[in-house]
Image (cartoon, grey):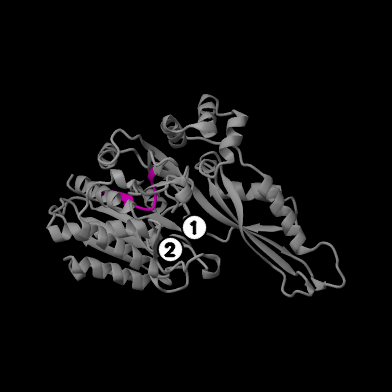
Amino acid sequence: MLIGCAAATFAAGAMAARAPAVDQALHDQALEILQKSIAFKTVDGAGQVPAYAEYLKSVLVDAGFAAADITIEPVANTATLVARYRGTDSKKKPLLVIGHMDVVEARREDWERDPFTPVIENGYVFGRGSVDNKFDISMVTATLAKLKRQGWKPKRDVILALSGDEETAMVSTQKLAAQFKHAELVLNGDAGGGLLSEEGEPVVYGLQAGEKSYADYKLTVTNPGGHSSRPTKPNAINQLARALDRIAEYEFPVMRNELTMAYFKQSLPKLSGPIAEAIKAYLADPQDAQAIATLSADPNYVGQLRTTCVATQIEGGHAPNALPQKAVANINCRIFPGVSVEEVQKTLTDIAADPDIAITLPGSGSVVSDASPLRKDVMNAVTKAVHARFPGLSIVPSMSAGATDSMHFRALGVPSYGVSGLFMKDSDEFAHGLNERVPVSAIDGALAHWDSLLKTLARQ
């Protein structure tokens, strides 16, 4: 996730002074769930997703859920969790709440703290997944457990459906999307959310209604190799490096749609400084080169302007005293709606400008999906939840620059909305990076957020 990622990064967290009053026992349970969630090393290949799912199931069963209403199913080397909170009207389509249990890899030697040992320090919970996506999973789980203990009765079924490989192949996501393709709508805790200024003031709440697709491209160079004492040309590593430099310098054409323009327009009144001036100029003239350059230099906004492609992995050579026989790089692209993966592949081939470099598309979990309609019931429910904390704050439909599970539901015609309960400063955003953290003060506001959303939308 990059909240509002997931970016124009709608990050996460909350201001303690404005957080709704929440029972201390509920706060403590939510924090405990988050800490225990972080401790499960749910990276690809570690095999801990099923164990994490079993832990979440135990929390819900302890709150009164029937064990038969919670299913954990193996999928490839991961798993899905489905927990059904039964409503009073079986004829109504269910409300689906989704998220992902897996996290991006984190290496102990790179972090200041063990990424899978949760630490509370200076008002933050540190650990891999503390934001992406175990915070909202923990808040939703705590909220559902509380509602079950209180005997709340929704009209329609509320189904918690958690995937296990959103960060990689999305095989489990595809399974869940096919299983619940007749759901009324999807609420996704892995997208959307609130942005605070560096002074701690709320700027905007982003409701994710669309997202980019993504693709990983493999660039491969093979040479005969030989002894390093007899250097020859071409050299596979040098060839690949030159191509990567050319790709790094390339900027895809600027594009826009209703979601991105709405985000810029609605967030402008709360911003100041060079970014505010650039947004104002861009709205007045989407071809303004200086405005585009300023926004492109900011990681929060570049994803809202164009397709982006970056090198994320590289490997080459087979021995320190031998010429490389092979060099391989991965280019990760976040593709603007309306642009095909084949079109991007052709562009990369043209930019690399080396016929000896093979550029292939190994395959990914990404699919192209249209934006979800801005349903009045969803907009009203989100507005109610957000304005309970920040009266009058702009609710802005947004497009995630990153990819989430929602794409697979949208592709099957299920309206899906990123509605994270987190508000946070941009400077606190470390999802997918080192020393990921989330403010403890975010908990109460997020719990109230999910309580409001579920009660409003599940009773309709």
Picture coordinates of residue 326 (x, y %)? 72, 67
> Crowding at label 2, few (<14), some or many (≥20) Cα neighbours within 10 Å?
many
Amino acid at the residue labelled 1? His
- Mark on residue 127? 2
Q: Disc 1 and disc 2: Cα gap in Å?
A: 11 Å
Count the labels in the image. Answer: 2
- Reply above or below: 18 against 178: above
Identify which amino acid the numbered label 2 is placed on. Gly
At which x and y percent is residue 179?
A: 31, 60
Residue at 44% from the left image edge and 63% from the top image edge: 128
Q: Where is residue 409 in the image (x, y as percent from the top left)?
A: 37, 52
Q: In this rendering, is residue 305 above or below 172? A: above
Under circle 1, the secondary element is loop
Task: Give yes or no for contact between labels 1 and 2 (Cβ–Cβ under 8 Å).
Answer: no
Instruction: Specify whether residue 85 is in view.
Output: no
Residue on which the image places disc 1:
432
Camera-side mark, 1 or 2? 2
Residue bounds of the magenta highlight: 183-194
